[in-house]
Image (tube, helix red, strand yellow):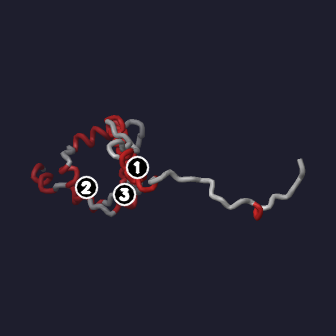
Amino acid sequence: MKNEKFDLENLPRENIFKVPDNYFDELPMRVQARTSGKAKRIPLVSWSKQRTWASVAACSTIAILGYFTLMPKQDSLGNEALSGVQNTEIVNYLIQENINQTDVAEQFENNKSTKFKDSELLDNLNVTDKDILQSIDTEHIQEEI
């Protein structure tokens, strides 16, 4: 084979492609005939009971985890927080919660793990003599004597 250069200028200029007669006049009718009635829509996502329940379970799990993750945490109360509470408020709270004095006394008796002397307990309570005298009903004591 000879190695000749290919020259586009020397090519014949004739149209080798032929279109059948009335092709473009009949084309819209052919396309419409093929597509009418045969078009079937395929959904991208098919829904079922399992998929619905799985969606509900996933949303519930996210909501529960979000609640416990973002829920404000309560810190423990220090000694200073309770020092401002008056004794009458504590007594009213115990009465409101239906806690009897005997129940409180039984809790102290049952708690044998910490053994304190009575004087140590009074020192740790930070109660003044004035508070003790206010809590004692002196009218009943004088009548009994």
Report how far apart the C-alphas of labels 3 and 2 lie in the structure: 15 Å
Give the amino acid type for the residue marked by disc 3 in the picture: Asn
Q: Residue furthest right?
A: 2
**C-beta proximity under 8 Å, tags 1 and 3:** no
Q: Position of residue 114 (x, y in %)?
A: 42, 40
Of the numbered discs 1 and 3, the one sitting upstream in the chain is 1
Q: Residue furthest left?
A: 143
Give the amino acid type for the residue marked by disc 1 in the picture: Val
Asked where in the image residue 136 lies, by quadrant, the reply is bottom left
Work out whether residue 136 or residue 55 is closer to the camera in this orientation and state it: 55
Of the numbered discs 3 and 2, the one sitting upstream in the chain is 2
Q: Which mark is residue 31?
A: 1
Secondary element at tag 3: loop
Give the amino acid type for the residue marked by disc 2 in the picture: Ile
Q: Which residue is mark 2?
A: 90
Report how far apart the C-alphas of labels 2 and 1 lie in the structure: 89 Å
Q: Position of residue 23 (x, y in %)?
A: 46, 52
Q: Position of residue 91 (x, y in %)?
A: 22, 54
Q: Is residue 9 left or right of residue 138?
A: right
Q: Residue at x 21, y 45 (%)?
A: 99
Q: Is residue 55 left or right of residue 18?
A: left
Q: Crowdedness of circle 3 by 10 Å Cα count: few (<14), some, many (20+)?
A: few
Secondary element at tag 2: helix
Q: Which residue is mark 3?
A: 126
Q: Mark 3 against mark 2, which lies toward the viewer?
A: 2
Q: Residue at x 30, y 60 (%)?
A: 129
Work out whether residue 99 or residue 113 is closer to the camera in this orientation and state it: 99
